[in-house]
Amino acid sequence: MSPIETTKPNLINKDANLSFVVELSEQISTIAFSNSELSQDLILIAFPREISVAQLDSQEPYELKELIKFNHGVQCTALSLSPITTIYGVPKILVFCAAGNDFKLRIFESDISQKDTTKVINAHSDYINDVAFDPDNNYLVSASDDNTAKLWSTEDYHCLYTFKLKSPAAHWAPSDPQIVGCLQHGELVIWDLTRASRPLYTKLLFADSGNSIKFSPFGELVATMSQLEGTLKVTNVQSQHQRLSAQISLASNISWHFRLPFVCVGVDNNLMFWKVT
């Protein structure tokens, strides 16, 4: 496992809330932390033509170590790690999906030592914005600018259903299936579906539209980002208090660590980690 250079935040950023920064050799396209306990310290990092699988030490000084790297060939637009992934057992199992700007999905499988396979799926007719495995690894879903979401069987990766989309994307709170959040013209809107007649609350965060929203794994915090304004904000769902506001540029997307209180964003060629409690 090769170490990746980790620096203190004050070396490249004056943000006092920034916990640490990992400097990489290329610009980051998109990132995805694991959403599963079996692989909770793994992060996928997409570069212009490669995808790195790295492991974050769960104790300070939080060194990031690269486990394996895959050739992707095209720009990656979205990533998701399968919940069957584990690096602690024998054999090791690594499965993840990468969406490319050629509108295709690629399923990578590896034992992180000798055997690697890639399955290419002709998935959509426009850019794929997000992909996700369900917690039981029965399905994979992909959402695209072609105004469809497609549900795939993980058994053989054939398409089970195609859903026509008519509304912007949203994110469900992982800890409470009744809470959903979305960004509408720069306004954070939180809904409680048990009382769906009106939003639980709204809060104006950005002068222009935000483009990314992600609840923390336990659902008490929600991170939002506006690439146009170059701002990352974290809000407490219950108190509505803002817990973080950070200026960023050339940002990728938002990802939370499964267990540690870190929100992470790829900024140019740096992985930036903020500790938010």
Image: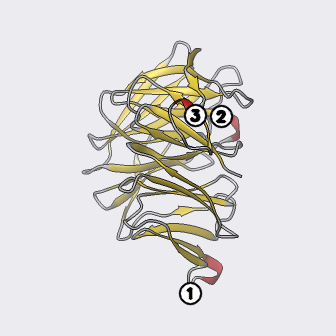
Quarter residue 122 falls in: top left
- Can you give x and y, in whole percent of width and height, for residue 192 in the image? 62, 76
Read off the residue under disc 1.
197
Q: Residue at x 71, y 42 (%)?
A: 260
- Mark nearer the N terminus (3 vs 1): 3
Indicate which disc residue 39 carries.
2
Q: Residues within 10 Å of mark 2 (few under 14, many from 20)?
A: many
Report helix, strand or loop for mark 1: loop
Distance Cα–Cα, label 1 vs label 2: 39 Å
Question: Residue drawn at (46%, 38%), measured in percent from left and top?
Answer: 97
Q: Earlier in the sequence, mark 1 or mark 2?
A: 2
Display colour scheme = secondary structure
Secondary structure under the numbered disc 2 in the rendered image:
helix
45 vs 18, left or right, is left
**Distance from Cα at disc 3 to Cα at disc 1:** 44 Å
Image disc number at residue 231: none
Q: Position of residue 261 (x, y in %)?
A: 69, 46
* Residue 191 occupies quadrant: bottom right
Image quarter hosting the N terminus: top right
Asked if the residue at tag 3 contacts the one at tag 2, i.e. Cβ–Cβ closer than 8 Å, the answer is no
Q: Amino acid at mark 1?
A: Ser
Please name the amino acid that badge 3 sits on. Pro
Q: Is residue 28 left or right of residue 239?
A: left
Q: Which residue is mark 3?
A: 9
Instruction: Tell me the CA gap for discs 2 and 3.
Output: 26 Å
Q: Residue furthest right?
A: 59
Relative to 108, say whether 132 is above or below. Answer: below
Dot in front, 2 or 3: 3
Helix, strand or loop at mark 3 = helix
Amino acid type assigned to the residue bearing label 2 in the image: Ser
